[in-house]
Image (tube, helix red, strand yellow):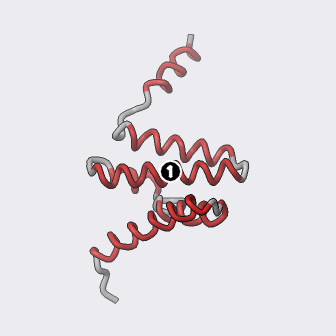
Amino acid sequence: MVHDPDATFFVVRARRRLCSAAHALGDVAHAVQACVAAAGGEDAVQAAVNEALGNPEDERELLEVFLHLAWAQASLRLWKEALRALDFASQVHRGGLPDDDDDEEEGAARE
C-alpha cells in the first residue's frame, strides 16, 4: 500500500472538524475521542504541536482542538487530563515559547 502524504492533511482536517462538531453538539464522550484523535493521539500530541507551529491556520485549529478537549475532559471531571490539554493549548498559543510562569514558580520553590 502506497502512503499518500496529501491524504494525511485531509484526515487531520476531518478529525479537527469532528472534534468541533462534537463540542458544538455538547457530546462530551465523542468530543474526548474526536479531540484526542485530532490532537494526534495520546502518544503524538507534542509532535502535532511542533508540526503546527509557524502555520497560523494550523495553530488556530489545534488551539481550538485543545480547548474543546479540555472542556470535554473537565465535563467528565478528568481534571488532570483537562489541565494537560490546557497546557498544550497554552504552548500553541505562545508559539512554542517556554512558559514564563513555570520559571517563576520554580525560582520561588528554590528560594
Mark 1 — residue? 66
* Relative image position of residue 81 (x, y in whole percent): 63, 48
Q: Nearer the viewer, residue 60 or 49?
A: 60
At 46% across and 51% down in the image, what residue appears?
Answer: 64
Task: Give the number of marks.
Answer: 1
From this viewpoint, is residue 43 visible? yes
Identify whether 82 is placed above or below 28. Answer: above
Q: Quadrant of residue 6?
A: bottom left
Residue 69 as seen in the image, left or right of residue 51:
right
* Relative image position of residue 60 (x, y in whole percent): 37, 50
* Relative image position of residue 98 (x, y in whole percent): 40, 32
Q: Amino acid at mark 1?
A: Phe
Residue extending furthest toward the front: 25
Q: Nearer the viewer, residue 21 or 2?
A: 21
Residue 84 as seen in the image, left or right of residue 48:
right
At 48% across and 45% down in the image, what residue appears?
Answer: 88
At 50% across and 26% down in the image, what residue appears?
Answer: 102
From this viewpoint, is residue 51 visible? no
